[in-house]
C-alpha cells in the first residue's frame, strides 16, 4: 500500500472562489467516489483512510459561508486512480477549470501537486496540496486505457491549458520513470471507442565494429 495525502474542499470569497475535489475510481464498479468517503461495503480494499482533519477556509467565516479544507491521509494500492476537478476564479485574472488523473505507482517519483490559493488576507491556506505521494499524472487517453470511466461531456476539461498554467508539480524524491507505452484507439462492434495501452518496444541500435577491430 502506498502512503498518500490529499487536500480537498473549497473557499468562497467576495468576487473570488476556489474548489479542489478528488474522486477515486472504485475498483469493482469503476464508479467515482469522493476521496473523503471511507471504503464501501464490497469494496476491493484498495483504499483506506488513516486520518482526516478539516478547517475553515476563511479565518473569520464559518464553513457554510466561506467553505473549508479537508486533509486526508490514506493508503492506496498500486494502480488506484484519482480524478481531480479544479475550479479557480481569482479576483483578478481569468477563471480556470480543468481535470486531471493521478495513478498510484510505488516506484514513481515522490511528487507534490499544488494549486495556488486565492491570496486573500483571511485565507487560511496560501496553496492547496491536492496530492502528495508516489504516482504518475496521466493524460486522458492514458487514464482511459488504464480503466478510467471517462464521460465524453467532461473530456474537454482534461489535458487543458489551464492545467499547465495552474498546477505546481514538484518532485520531492526521484523514482523510476514509467515504462514507455503507446495508446491505441479503436472501435468495438457497437461503434464505441476503445482505448488500450501497449508497452512500446524500444528500437535496438546495432553498433558496427570499427574498421580493423
Image: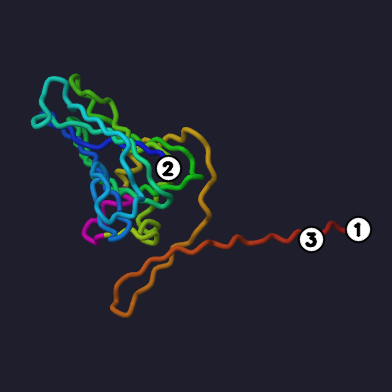
The relative height of residue 150 versus residue 13 in the rendered view (above or below) is: below
The residue pinned by badge 2 equals 2
Judged from the image, the secondary structure of the residue bearing numbered disc 2 is strand
In the drawing, what numbered circle is on residue 208?
3
Q: Position of residue 164 (x, y in %)?
A: 35, 42
Q: Is 184 left or right of 67, judged from the image as shown?
A: right
Mark 1 Cα shell of 10 Å, populated few (<14), some (14-19), many (≥20): few
Q: Earlier in the sequence, mark 2 or mark 1?
A: 2
* Residue at (50, 34) in percent of width and height: 173
Judged from the image, the secondary structure of the residue bearing numbered disc 3 is loop
The relative height of residue 180 versus residue 21 in the rendered view (above or below) is: below
Q: Nearer the viewer, mark 2 or mark 1?
A: 2
Q: Position of residue 112 (x, y in %)?
A: 40, 35
Q: Earlier in the sequence, mark 3 or mark 2?
A: 2
Q: Separation of disc 2 and disc 1 at Cα? A: 54 Å
Front in this rendered view, residue 210 or 43: 43
Judged from the image, the secondary structure of the residue bearing numbered disc 1 is loop
Q: Which residues are magenta?
A: 151-160
Q: Quadrant of residue 152?
A: bottom left
The residue pinned by badge 1 equals 212
CB under 8 Å between callouts 2 and 1? no
Q: Separation of disc 3 and disc 1 at Cα? A: 11 Å
Amino acid at each position: 500500500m502506498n502512503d498518500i495525502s490529499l487536500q480537498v474542499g473549497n473557499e468562497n470569497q467576495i468576487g473570488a472562489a476556489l474548489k479542489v475535489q478528488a474522486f477515486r475510481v472504485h475498483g469493482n464498479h469503476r464508479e467515482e467516489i469522493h476521496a473523503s468517503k471511507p471504503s464501501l461495503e464490497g469494496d476491493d480494499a484498495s483504499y483506506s483512510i488513516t486520518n482526516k482533519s478539516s478547517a475553515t477556509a476563511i479565518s473569520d467565516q464559518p464553513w457554510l459561508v466561506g467553505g473549508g479544507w479537508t486533509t486526508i491521509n490514506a493508503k492506496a494500492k498500486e494502480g488506484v486512480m484519482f480524478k481531480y476537478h479544479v475550479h479557480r476564479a481569482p479576483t483578478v485574472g481569468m477563471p480556470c477549470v480543468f481535470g486531471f488523473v493521478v495513478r498510484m505507482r510505488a516506484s514513481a517519483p515522490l511528487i507534490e501537486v499544488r494549486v495556488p490559493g486565492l491570496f486573500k488576507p483571511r485565507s487560511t491556506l496560501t496553496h492547496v496540496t491536492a496530492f502528495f505521494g508516489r504516482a504518475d499524472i496521466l493524460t486522458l487517453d492514458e487514464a482511459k486505457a488504464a480503466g478510467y470511466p471517462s464521460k465524453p461531456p467532461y473530456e474537454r476539461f482534461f489535458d487543458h491549458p489551464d492545467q499547465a498554467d495552474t498546477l505546481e508539480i514538484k518532485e520531492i524524491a526521484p523514482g523510476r520513470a514509467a515504462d514507455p507505452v503507446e495508446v491505441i484507439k479503436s472501435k468495438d462492434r457497437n461503434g464505441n471507442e476503445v482505448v488500450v495501452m501497449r508497452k512500446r518496444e524500444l528500437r535496438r541500435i546495432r553498433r558496427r565494429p570499427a574498421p580493423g577491430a
